[in-house]
Amino acid sequence: MIYRENGQFKTSYRADQQIFPIAQDRIAIGLLVAFAIVGVPLLADEYLFRAILIPFLIMALAAMGLNILVGYCGQISLGTGAFMAVGAYAAYNFFVRIDGMPVIVAILLGGVCTTVAGVLFGIPSLRIKGLYLAVATLAAQFFFDWAFLRVKWFTNDSTSGTVSVADLSLFGVRIDNPLGKYYFCLGFVLVFALVAKNLVRGHIGREWMAMRDMDVAAAVIGIRPVYAKLSAFAVSSFFVGVAGALWGFVHLGSWEPAAFNIDRSFQLLFMVIIGGLGSIMGSFFGAAFIVVLPIFLNQALPALGSLIGIDISTALISHTELMIFGGLIVFFLIVEPHGLARLWSIAKEKMRLWPFPH
């Protein structure tokens, strides 16, 4: 009986078009954000920040960008890891080659460079779709892997191919401890999540969803496929590029091209499928699941093996992780194609109707 909208009257279009029209949702999201800002730093230790929270925030941002392209616009992409690499290396070059470059500006410029790359590789989407488009984006993955490994200019002539950043600061405050890095990533995620939610609720989001549902019918009613598809590639690439820069600057600190290989692309696609296609909240669900599950398996499987007297190797744990990912993807594609976000939506609908069965 708590989750009800009885008596919540809307007296203006502005009130009716809120992001969260139900007061309980606004309160819950406000409390969740407040807990992320105040509660988490009081409860989490350094390991939790480095191993779970910071990777979760960055992966959620990247999954959000991929979800805009795949979930909202219906354009399949298998080169997300490459676009993360473009954002990371572009931001790195802006940061080290321009004296006094603020880290936020470098990260955003990395996102802009990724936008250009995403639009270029999104041009084939005007003629092809489905499996053929997936192969075209996969070509971007192989091309950028080769470029960042062979072209020394991107790594500032590093002989080992590894680049690193240090002495990060924001408005004179150093970002060198886990708490500072957490707040830095949290700020980006909150702003970008708000931007993404408003984009998909606006006219451009409706154009993306029309192209996803039936592109021929969308073109008939006046939606321009060129604008809709390339804008989806542009926005998605910008989000992914910023996430890649954060992954390199904040989480890794030092990286090489292998940090953004094809495994990263598939990992992000798994996040979107498991979390929920066409859902901003699903991006967070998927990122949390993918980030936490390997850590849980690394802790639970050895404990289970010692309990039953079986020695479980690291290789077996790694293979078990892949099998579980594959099984979950098949399960969600068959049972609930809209992922964890749809299950959460069904639970909220049940709460709104409880205890009445209708």
Image (tube, rainbow, N blue to C red):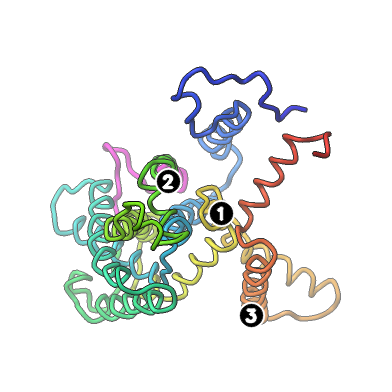
* Extreme residue toward the right, this view: 308
Instruction: Examine the structure image and report whether residue 1 is included in the region drawn in magenta.
Output: no
The part of the image, by quadrant, that contains residue 123 is bottom left
Label 1, secondary structure: give it: helix
Q: Which residue is mark 1?
A: 47
Q: Amino acid at mark 2?
A: Val
Q: Nearer the viewer, mark 1 or mark 2?
A: 2
In the visual, does 329 lie left or right of 193? right
Which residue is depicted at the point 34% across and 77% down? 136
Q: CA distance from mark 3 to mark 2?
A: 37 Å
83 vs 320, left or right, is: left
Q: Is residue 156 visible?
A: yes
Q: Mark 2 sits on what residue? A: 200
Q: Nearer the viewer, mark 3 or mark 2?
A: 2
- Which stretch is magenta? 165-185
- Counting residues from the start of the chain, the first of labels 1 and 2 encountered is 1
